[in-house]
Amino acid sequence: MKKYIILVLVLAATLTGCDALRKLAGRPTEAQVEQMRQDLLAEREARHQARLDSIRQVQQALEDSLEVLRESGVAKSSEGFLAKDYPHTYAIVLGAFKEQGNAEKLAATVRAAGYEAEVVRFRNGFNSVCASPTDDLNVAFRNLDRLFAEDFCPLDAWILVNE
């Protein structure tokens, strides 16, 4: 009897294909499996596209924020300013001095207050004190707010945008 059932199943499989056996077993057919695969790929693609769109929105928001800061004078581009390459995208410029010693003195005061500071030479011959260098605009803006609370920070401090 077992041989007869096995023979019928093998014969049915060869004549009707594996989908008939899959249906009998309650499993998805080949077409259903392919549809599920296509749905999964489409879902993955949609999630990936959503992530890309989110990144584009954040980049656009940063560019818009930077443009507003430039228009208000809080941020200025380094284009044509720097005498040499500067490794960071943003820094807070606290002052510009013709005398290197004056710039070094302010930089020492800034360092003593716990901030990172360095003297950066500009092409026009001035030595600028750049504090709290960073590559993140949000961090640069927070650093500017913190520095404004310090006694040594002038009211005309600005964010250098190294492009």
Image (cartoon, rainbow, N blue to C red):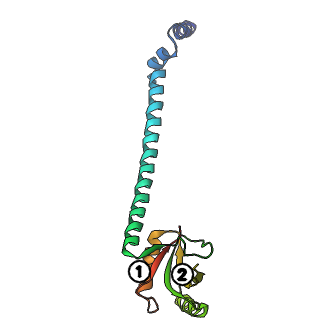
Does 105 sit left or right of 70 as displayed? right
**Looking at the image, is mark 1 or mark 2 earlier in the sequence?**
2
Residue at the image position 44 percent from the left and 74 percent from the top: 75
What is the three-letter code of the residue carrying label 1?
Answer: Asp
What is the three-letter code of the residue carrying label 2?
Answer: Cys
Looking at the rendered structure, which numbered label has been put on residue 20?
A: none
Query: What SS does tag 2 mark?
Result: strand
Residue at the image position 38 percent from the left and 63 percent from the top: 64
> Which mark lies nearer to you, 1 or 2?
2
Q: Position of residue 119 (x, y in %)?
A: 59, 84
Mark 2 closeness class: few <14, some 14–19, many ≥20 residues within 10 Å? many
Mark 1 closeness class: few <14, some 14–19, many ≥20 residues within 10 Å? few
Q: Position of residue 15 (x, y in %)?
A: 52, 7
Q: Position of residue 111 (x, y in %)?
A: 56, 88
Query: What SS does tag 1 mark?
Result: helix
Quarter of the image where the N terminus is located: top right
Residue under circle 1?
A: 145
Looking at the rendered structure, which numbered label has been put on residue 130?
A: 2
Q: Position of residue 122 (x, y in %)?
A: 57, 79
Residue farthest toward the right in the current orientation of the protein: 84
